Image: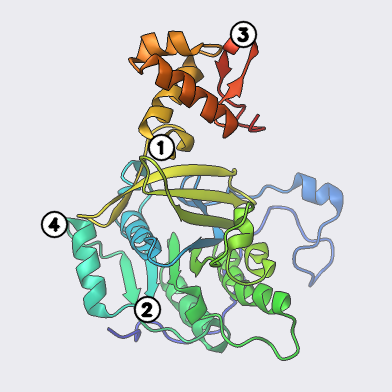
Amino acid sequence: MSNTHLTAVPPLFPSRRRSSKAPLPYAGLNGVWTADQLMAAEFPEPKWAVLGILSEGVNLLAGPPKVGKSWMALGLGLAVAAGGEAFGSLPVEGGPVLYLALEDTARRLQIRMGKLLGGQPAPSALTLTTECPPLPQGGAEMIAKWLDRNPQARLVVIDVFAKVRGAAPIGASAYDADYAAVGHAKQLADHYSVCVVLVHHLRKASSDDWLTEVSGTNGIAGAADATLVLKRGRGQADGVLLITGRDVEEAEYALSFQKDSGAWQLLDGPAEDHLIGDTRAVILRYVRTHPGVRPKQLSEATGIDIALARKTCARMADDHQLRRGPGGAYFAPDRRTGE
């Protein structure tokens, strides 16, 4: 597979910039307004590749090795290109997609797509390539040329980011180098109002703050518009997708990985219901709809043995999955505060 359909062109074209209806107060200065002009300006709504999850801008998709990041990225690319459903249940608007599979061969891509498609026709709106130079050395211009040819493009996936980040600027600090590396992708995303996904890795060491687990300095996540971290799940879920960003609300989603098809599917309900064992999940769902319930009442309603109900409720309270109330009652924790 070659990338002959991607040729080098200058990366920025003023005619492609989206602008507000308000004039600029100073000729020749882009992005400068007086306060009253800025408040009067009408800006277009962000374009979503996957509503509530992937917005226009740079989206960092990070996870540990072999967790299924590439399966997820390719599945999203196929869904958006075909205008189907992302994660098996979220309708998406179709449009051209560019997928840079820089750690794969054409044969491996064919096998993976065959599993993901499950007999459905492959969408012609998905363009794939296994080659791309670093973004600072021609890669950005190559992607820009494809975007110019596909003005309705909705998604660009770079798998993996390390393959195109390029060498660090001479004399730059590690933070500045990381920030600048993501900045090349952000220029493309902002200029073409498109969602760009950078597939990346996590550090080996875990942390209470999952954002700090992203490999590299804080400049990587700091330069991105949104960060999505895919981690291995517990209990009923195979994975959990943690999301935070400038235009997306902070959220977490429980996911199930379908080994036969290679697809990630969104599980219904709050993520915490699927990230704990079966007994705890049943208790949490019941307590959420019956706040102030006691173990005996819970046992009678769910069929869980009374001794097991008492012991599990106590342990869940110790693990901050339930909140103890007066008289042995239990409540679900406040999702906003965790208490």
Number of disc labels: 4
Amino acid type of disc 1?
Answer: His
- Estimate the x, y position of residue 187 in percent, counting from the top left: 61, 71
| Drawn side of residue 329 relative to residue 241, left or right | right
Amino acid type of disc 3?
Answer: Gly
Q: Earlier in the sequence, mark 3 or mark 2?
A: 2
Q: Residues within 10 Å of mark 1 (few under 14, many from 20)?
A: many
- Labelled disc at residue 103: 2
- Depth order, front residue of 50/221: 221
Q: Are marks 4 and 3 in contact (CB under 8 Å)?
A: no
Q: Earlier in the sequence, mark 2 or mark 4?
A: 2
Separation of marks 2 and 4 at Cα, in angstroms: 25 Å
Residue at label 1? 274
Nearer the camera: disc 1 or disc 3: 3
Q: Indicate the quadrant where residue 235 lies.
A: top left
Separation of marks 1 and 2 at Cα, in angstroms: 32 Å
| Drawn side of residue 47 relative to residue 182, left or right | left
Q: In the orientation shown, which residue stands out farthest toward the left?
A: 119
Q: Earlier in the sequence, mark 4 or mark 1?
A: 4
Separation of marks 1 and 3 at Cα, in angstroms: 29 Å
- Estimate the x, y position of residue 309 in percent, counting from the top left: 43, 19
